[in-house]
Amino acid sequence: MKKIIKAVFFLVFIFILASCGKKKAVNDVDRGGNSSDSTNSSAKIVVEDGRKIIYDVRYSLEAKDINEYQKKIETKLAEYEGYIESMETRTYFSTATYRIKKASLDDFVNYIDSFDGAVEDKSIKTTDVSTTYNSKQARKTVLEASRASYLAMLSQDDLTISDVIAIQDKIERIDIELEQIYLDIDTYDGLIEYSTVTVSYYEKGEYSEPSFIESYGKYIGEFFITIGKVILYLLPFALLGGVTCLIVFGTLKSKKKKRLAKQKEQENNSNNIN
């Protein structure tokens, strides 16, 4: 048990050192997680080395042929080794979310800015996650050191079953927290390394309100279509109900005939006896 006590003191010493390192890491940077928005179409994106900054750029483009601009942007995206994260397309509107390397973001944005007359709106959002990121890295270091110490304790010969179970439980708890930290760090790395550019495409055109006759004709057409759908929906139930009624009616009629025949037979037997 003396070895266990020494190991516990060793763990406490590691936690103290790691906590001091964590405080220093947090104090070395400004408070992270701060966001700022810019709607200036000429705002230049400054990629700051050493900072953990997430860039989110949003555009609204309006043109008669939105497919033309969409193809241009996707071609330029491929040149910068970016990729399409998601795409939603409707009749006169579509939205695409692109991911592009942080180092190429400024050039990519400048290319979209060059679409004279098509850019209706633009916004740039920056989120500094340096403090949160460094805190998670410091916590990861502490947990990994603690896990290594507990694994070393398991190699001792004088451990009881209770000691082994307790140590394994602590290792399991550390593994659960580490798994979440690894996931968070990977997510941050992806958002930091590849910036997000979302473009909403709107098709420009002259749209007139339909006339009363057109609207009424459309209403009548939709009315009859709805009635037809209702009939088609109810038809199987109507057929099933009709078949069921025929079976029930036929069964009742058959039973009635049998009952009348039996009554007639009884009457004939009674007359013969008399």
Image (cartoon, helix red, strand yellow):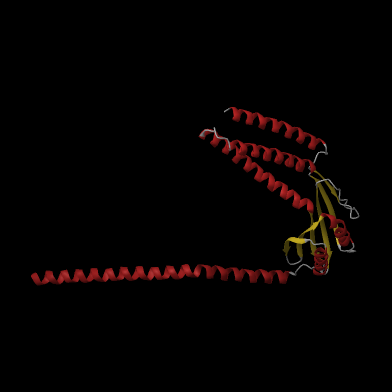
Q: Image quarter for residue 73?
A: bottom right
Q: Image quarter for residue 3?
A: top right
Compared across the picture, whether 253 is left or right of 170 comes to left
Q: Can you give x and y, in whole percent of width and height, for residue 97 in the image?
A: 76, 59
Q: Image quarter for residue 145?
A: top right
68 or 56, nearer to the observer: 56
Looking at the picture, does residue 243 appear above or below residue 151?
below
Hey, which residue is sitting farthest left in the picture?
A: 274
Res 266 visible: yes
Compared across the picture, whether 9 is left or right of 97 comes to left
Res 274 visible: no
Q: Can you give x and y, in whole percent of width and height, for residue 36 in the image?
A: 83, 46
Looking at the picture, does residue 51 appear above or below residue 110?
above
In the rendered image, the quadrant that contains the N terminus is: top right
Compared across the picture, whether 177 is left or right of 159 comes to right
In the rendered image, the quadrant that contains the C terminus is: bottom left
In the image, what residue occupies the spot 79% across and 61% down?
82
Q: Can you give x and y, in whole percent of width and height, for residue 250 in the image?
A: 33, 71
42 or 221, nearer to the observer: 42
In the image, what residue occupies the spot 73% across and 41% down?
136
Compared across the picture, whether 220 is left or right of 199 comes to left
79 or 255, nearer to the observer: 79
Q: Can you give x and y, in whole percent of width and height, for residue 265 in the image?
A: 17, 71
189 or 229, nearer to the observer: 189
Looking at the picture, does residue 81 appear above or below residue 52?
below
